[in-house]
Amino acid sequence: MSETTKLRLPLIAAAQAQKHVTHNEALLKLDALLHLEVMDKDRDAPPANPADGDRYIVGAGASGAWAGEAGHVAAFQDGVWRFHPPQIGWRAFVRDEGALYVKAQSGWIAVGGGAGGGALQNVTLFGLGTEADAVNPFSARVGKALWAATTVAEGGTGDLRYTLNKEAAANVLSLLFQRGWSGRAEMGLIGDDDFQIKVSANGSMWREAMRIDGASGRAAFPGGIAPRPWVNLTDAATVTIDAAAGDRFRLAAGGSRTLAKPVNLMDGMRFILRVTNSANVTLTLNAAFAPFSGSAPALRAGAGQSNTFDCVYDAAADKVFYAWY
């Protein structure tokens, strides 16, 4: 008997007797395979009391009435089991898992969930808002992205950790930042196991800005550290330094001035203050300032002279200790 290529539906021959038998056989196959939905895909033996129309994907250990039919679609119709070998690309909704499966060369694989959720497994290309390809099998074109930890109330731990892994030390594991598809910054394990940050002005010449040694944890800055800019203080009878504004301050003093205790100090914070006299000056330091030497220096008071204070804050003593020069 002749059959169709894909679903193997029987064809009615010319001048065939009892055409209805062949026709009905084709309808039964269509009824079993069209909009395929199966009860289970892991059973090895048929259920004791199947309902008419129930369908299953036979498990790998097929036995009993299903013997020799592993991976096939078993449909219970008119009191008997009918078996249909699937072809690559067939899709089936598996009811007990609430998941959609597709027939691949290697077998049935999950490709997504139904209304009740499910898994998305073994997808070779995934494009979100764009097309993925062999070089970029996961691609996304979005304006914003959000990753949030599963809370304890939702069954999670409240933590969120990304795990990125490379095969060997000589491989690259990094985040690359680009403009117009030309690299501008990169950070990660770039060719070794030290954490690095590199920058580029043109995408071809790269400069290493920071390296943290993987063995010792020590940080190095091959390009040097740019100093913070000077903060010019406003001249007034009482001058107060905001330690959060910088670490290098300068003041052009034009008369009798009092230097107040700085604000926003943190333990161990260090800063420099340079006072240049634009006129004869009497400079008084708040009691929070204490010289390292133990004795206060004779500050320069003449016009055009200057005093420089190298300061560090000790929170335990609540003192700004300074060296003067």
Image (cartoon, rainbow, N blue to C red):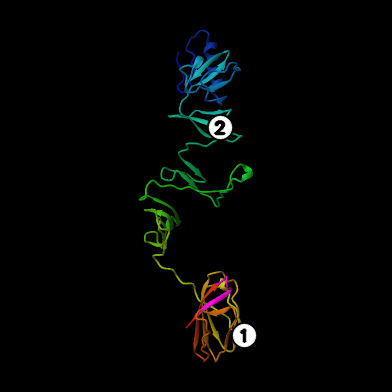
In the rendered image, residue 309 lying in the magenta stretch gets the answer no
Could you tell me if residue 85 is visible in this image? no
Q: Residue furthest right?
A: 153
Above or below, 56 relative to 239 = above
Quadrant of the image occupied by residue 203? bottom left
Write the residue at 55% across / 11% down.
Answer: 20
Write the residue at 62% across / 45% down.
Answer: 152
| Classed neighbour count for the residue bearing mark 2: other residues with Cα under 10 Å, few (<14), some (14–19), many (≥20) | many
SS for tag 1? loop
Mark number, residue 237: 1
Q: Position of residue 171 (x, y in %)?
A: 37, 49
| Classed neighbour count for the residue bearing mark 1: other residues with Cα under 10 Å, few (<14), some (14–19), many (≥20) | few
Q: Position of residue 315 (x, y in %)?
A: 57, 70
Which residue position is annotated with label 2? 99
Above or below, 50 relative to 222 = above
Which quadrant of the rendered structure holds the N terminus? top left
Mark number, residue 164: none
* Stretch of the chain drawn in magenta: 314-322
Q: Residue furthest left?
A: 170
Write the residue at 57% across / 73% down.
Answer: 317
Write the residue at 54% across / 73% down.
Answer: 313
Three-letter amino acid code of the residue under disc 1: Ala
Q: Position of residue 170 (x, y in %)?
A: 35, 50
Q: Residue furthest front?
A: 294
In the rendered image, residue 320 lying in the magenta stretch gets the answer yes
